[in-house]
Image (cartoon, rainbow, N blue to C red):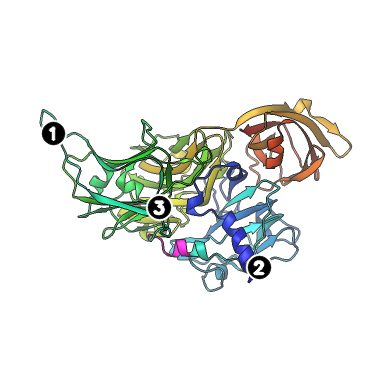
Amino acid sequence: MMATMTLGLVLAQLVPALADLPVLDASAHAVQAHYVSSYDRSGGNDDGFDGTYSALYVDERGEHVIFDVKGPGTLYNLWFTSRVNGRSPLGWGRIRFYFDGEATPRVDMDADELFSGRHPPFVPPFVYHAFQSTGGYVTYLPFPFQKGLKITTERRVGFYNAYYHTYAPDRLVTSWTGREDVSVLETLWAKAGTGPPRGENLEIVNGTVSPPAPLMPDGEPQPSRSLVFEREGGGVIRTLRLNPLFPLTAYQLQHLVLRIYWDGQSEPAVQAPVGHFFGSGLGETDVDAAPLGMSSSGPYYFYFPMPFWRSARIELVNENPDPIPELWWEVGLEPNVYDEQATGYLHARFRKEWPTTEGEDYRILDADGRGRYLGQMMTVEPLRAELKRWWEGDLRIRLDGRRHPVFNGTGHEDEYLGGWSNEWLMNPYSLPMHGEPVTRELRQVDFQWSAATSVYRFFVGGIPFVNGIHVSTEHGAENTATAMYSSVAYYYSRPEVMEKLDSIEENTLQADGAAGSRRFTLRAGDPQSHLRLRRFYRPRARQEAEVWVDGERIGVWYDGAIDEHTPVVESDFLLPEAIARRGGEIEIEIRPVGMNWSELGYELWGLR
C-alpha cells in the first residue's frame, strides 16, 4: 500500500492538476515539451503513407524504434492510426516499452490489444481505440521515466505521434510500473463536465443577463456591452458557466463575444466568441472536454482556474443585430492563494482568416513572455466542398526563439488524434482532452468526403515556454488548400522573458583531450531562477554527450529524433536550479559519447 501511495504522489507531481497550471515558478520552467511524429522531413506530404519517417532507426534486435529519450521525463500521449483506413486494426505486431536502459521491456504486447481497453491499466479514460477516437488509437496513460524510455514496434508503423516532457537532470522521477494511483486523473476525465471538486471556500455568484441591441441615431443597431461579473480585490475564478434560456443559433454564438479583464487591464486577456470559447465554432453541439464544454440542453462550462489580485471583470459584447435570448451565468470563486510573482493570467486569443493565405501558415497564436500553453480549438469551413484536402496541413509550434518547430504534426485529423479524413469527418467524437465534436454540410466529392468541422486538443501538463510561443498550421499540404479558419488559443502567461546571457562560437571551442571533449566558460552574471544551454549543430543520428559543470557531471545530452533535411538545428539542455542560483561564471565541459556529436556553437540563456 505504501508503495502505491508513493507512486501516486510522484505521478501527481508529474501531471499538474488544474489548480497547478497557472503556476510559472522556476520548477515549472525546468520542463521542456516535445513532440515526435512521422512527418515528412523533406517538406512534402509523405507523413506515414509509405513509412519513410515512421521509425527513428532499427536497433540491434531488429525492432523499429519510434521513441528514444534519455534522462528524466514523462510520456503523456502516444497516437497511431492504421495505414489502411480509419476502421482497420493497426496490424503491425507488438509494441515494447524499455525503461531506464533495461534489456527487458516492462510493456510487451500486441498493439491492437494494448488499445483494446481490455487490459488494465490500459483502459478508458486513458486508452481509446479507432471506434472511440474516430480512426485514432490513443493512450493518455502517463509513463514517467528516470533514466530514459525507448519504445519499439515489431514492424514499421505508418502514422504516429508522441507528446512528452523532459526535466532538468536533477529531477527525481519514479519510473512507471503499472501500479501507479491515477484515480485523481481518472475522476477528472471520466466525469468531464462536472468540474473540479468544490472546496469549502467556494463562493457561488450567479445571475441573468439579456444584452440589449440599442439603436444608433440612424436606426441601425450597434454592438452593446453587458456586464456579467465584476469583483474588486483578489480571487480565483474556478468555474465559469453560461446557460441560454433558449438555444442559440450558430450566428448568435459567433457574434456574442466574451471579454474578461484582469487587474484593471485596458485590453481583455480573454476575447472570443462564446461558441468558440466553449468549444464549437459551428453552433451548439455536445462538447464533453474536461476543461470546457457545451450542450444544447445544459450549461456551457469552463474550468481552467483564473487567478487575479486586484479586480476581475467579465462582460458580453453583443454584435448581433437583434437581442439574444436571456442568459443565466454562474461564477465559482475562491480566495487567491497564488504567488503573484510566479503566476500567469489566463488568456484566450481568438483569430480568424476568411479565407487563408496561399503559401502561408494559418497562425493560431503569436505570444511573447513566458507561460504555459494549454491547447486550442479550431474551426475549418471550406469555401466549397470541392476545395478539400485542407486537412493535410501540419501543426507547427515554435518555442523560446528557436527557429525550428519543436512540434511538427502530420495533418489535422492526426493532431486531433483521429485518423483518415473520410471516417474522421463522418463520425464526430468528444473526449476529455481532444475531440472533433461537430461536422456540418458533409458532402462526398470523388472518393473523399468534405465538411466543415470544429476540433479541440489540450496538452496534459501544458507546453511551457520562457521566451514566446508561435502556434500555426498549414492549410493543406504546403498551404495549398484555401479555406476559412478560426481558432481560440488558451494559455497562461507573464511578461518576463528568458534572455541570452553569453555565447561561444564553433571556432573558439577548444578540444580537451583525445576524446574530443570541449571545455569553455560562459557568464551567467547575476543569480538566475532558470538557466539553459542552447546548442546549434548539424543533424546526425543519435548524438550523445555527458555534460559537466564546474567539475560535476550533470547529466546526458541526447538527441534521438533528427531532421536530416534541416541544415542547422537547435537543442536546449536545462541546468539544475542550484547552478542557476549561483550566477557568476560557469565552466562547462561537453564529453561526446561516440563519434556523432556535432556543435556549431553554444548560448547560455537565463530567466531572473
Which quarter of the rendered picture does the C terminus lie within?
A: top right
> How far is mark 1 from mark 3, CA to CA?
36 Å
> Residue 589 vs residue 86: left or right?
right
Q: Amino acid at mark 2?
A: Ala
Q: Is residue 55 visible?
A: no
Q: Which mark is residue 3?
A: 2
Mark 1 or mark 2, which has the lower sequence index?
2
Neighbour tally class for label 1: few under 14, some 14-19, many 20 plus, Cα within 10 Å: few
Q: Is residue 489 visible?
A: yes
* Badge 1 amino acid: Leu
Q: Look at the image and give the residue range highlighted in magenta.
A: 187-193
Whether residue 442 sits left or right of residue 158 in the image: it is left
Instruction: Examine the structure image and report whether residue 192 is included in the region drawn in magenta.
Output: yes
Disc marking residue 419: none
**Residue 189 percent coordinates (x, y):** 45, 61
Left or right: 480 in relation to 141: left
Q: In which quadrant of the rendered view does residue 533 lie? A: top right
Q: List the residue tagged with mark 1.
A: 215
Provide residue 198's location: percent of width, then percent of height.
41, 59
Q: Is residue 555 magenta?
A: no
What whole-number distance in Å separates the C-alpha atoms at marks 2 and 3?
32 Å
- Numbered disc in front, either 1 or 2: 2
Q: Quadrant of the N terminus?
A: bottom right
Front residue of 517/567: it is: 517
